[in-house]
Amino acid sequence: MNLKLLGGMLLIAGTALGAGMLAIPMVLAKFGVLWGSLLMVAIWLGTTYAALLLLEATLRSGGGIGMNSIAQKTLGKQGQIITNGLLYCLVTCLMIAYIVSAGDLLQQLINKLGWQLSLIQSQLLFTVCIGAFVAQGTASVDKLNRLLFFAMLIALIVTLAYLLPNIDMNNFQQQESANKVDLIKHSAVLFTSFGFMVVVPSVVKYNSEATHKQLRNMVVFGSTLPLFCYLLWLVAVVGNLPAEQLVSFANVSELIATLSLQYPNLGSVLSLFTGLALVTSFLGVAMSLFDQNRDLFKSNKLVTFLITFMLPLLGAIIAKEQFIGVLGYAGIILVFLAIFIPMAMVMKVRSDDFEQVNESYYQVAGGKSALVACLFFGGFLLVSQVI
């Protein structure tokens, strides 16, 4: 795999592998590692297949730097409007959350160094600095993301080196709840943990010279890396802390504090991981929105930068931490954008009246049966978020 394909894979993985990973053991511990892992693998399969559907629609329609062009070519004007509306709602919500969280971390770091910076100033500093990389294009984002992603993996490896050798096997036998309906209710947390689909058009455009097989492998490997990290983290934390203690934590800070008491210096490593995870996720999401705005408004980089970052920054300044709770509704938007929209696109490009851009095209395996299964998967996710 060449460096650009590796970069595309890491952009996919980095967008998915966010700071929300730290909360996964707190959510799944009471149901047992086995059932939690099975649900995670099932959601990974569904989201990866849906991402491959988006890849097929991107390639067969001739692509574009954002979902705007693909939706226009496959779903027409109405489908384009619906897709853009869903994308802007989702990505803006995510960017606001990332700016709020990253601004808080940056403020704490700078204050520890002896400089005083307000929360608004730290949010502005973070947005401008990271936004400058995004505005330079996918190649610039790729290089920064590679560096940050490998640093994040090192932090994760150091954490696992503390936790894995001290696993208590008795913890895996604990199961606070056998209620599978309650387990299904938490599917949204896992689903959003694999929410990387928005970057697929950008990384395909970035790797325009790659073969269809290489692009498919890029998406599959990019989604598999977060799954591997999530499973290792779940096993490591549940193996070190009993389920009744994990479910009693109100937030991730309590989990980090407890692990820090048990393992000195681990708190700083986990804080580093959290910060890096926020930045890599922000890079992927911001890049997808920046490319979408370039595709939609056909403006220069400065105008596109202002369109992309002004609203999320304003939302972060106004909403502060209170806005984070609204992100629960983003999961419903993501189901439509990441599951149903790619399905509709693929049904169109596979129809007889769609004009293919070339004779050689990529098609996801599975045929109609897999599409029906994907439809039920989307329905399952919607039900899990409303029951």
Image (cartoon, rainbow, N blue to C red):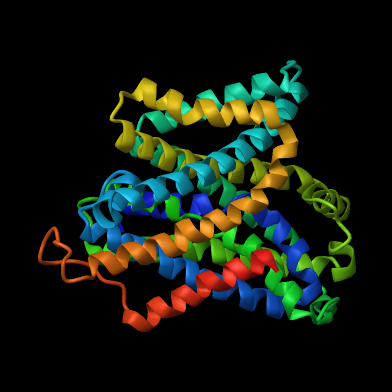
Q: Position of residue 121 (x, y in %)?
A: 66, 19
Is residue 350 depicted above or below 10 in this figure?
below
Q: In which quadrant is the C terminus drawn?
A: bottom right
Residue sitting farthest toward the front: 78
Which residue corresponds to the image point at 81% horizontal and 66% vertical from the top-left? 240
Image coordinates of residue 194 in percent, x first then y, are 54, 60
What residue lies at 62% left-to-right and 70% top-to-bottom?
A: 383
Please report the residue visible at 72 percent of the width from the left and 46 percent of the height from the top. Answer: 325
Query: Do we see residue 122 in this rendering?
Result: yes
* On screen, residue 140 above or below 169: above
In the image shown, does 206 or 296 lie closer to the viewer?
296
Residue occupying the point 77% across, 75% down:
31
Q: Based on the displayed image, in which of its 4 quarters is residue 233 positioned? A: bottom right
Say left or right for 218 vs 128. Answer: left
User: 81 or 378, which is in the foreground?
Assistant: 81
Q: Where in the figure is residue 149, as x and y percent of width and height?
A: 52, 47
**72 horizontally vs 373: left or right:** left
- Determine the image quadrant of residue 324: top right
Q: Is residue 167 visible?
A: no
Q: Work out which quarter of the rendered image holds the N terminus and state it.
A: bottom left
Horizontal side of residue 219 vs 22, given as left or right: left
Name the side, left or right, on which 212 lies relative to 124.
Answer: left
Instruction: Compare residues 44 and 218 and report the one nearer the observer.
Output: 44
Number of marks in picture: 0
Q: Residue 93's x, y, as percent? A: 58, 41
In the image, residue 98 above or below residue 191? above
Up-down relation of residue 328 to residue 176 (above or below): above
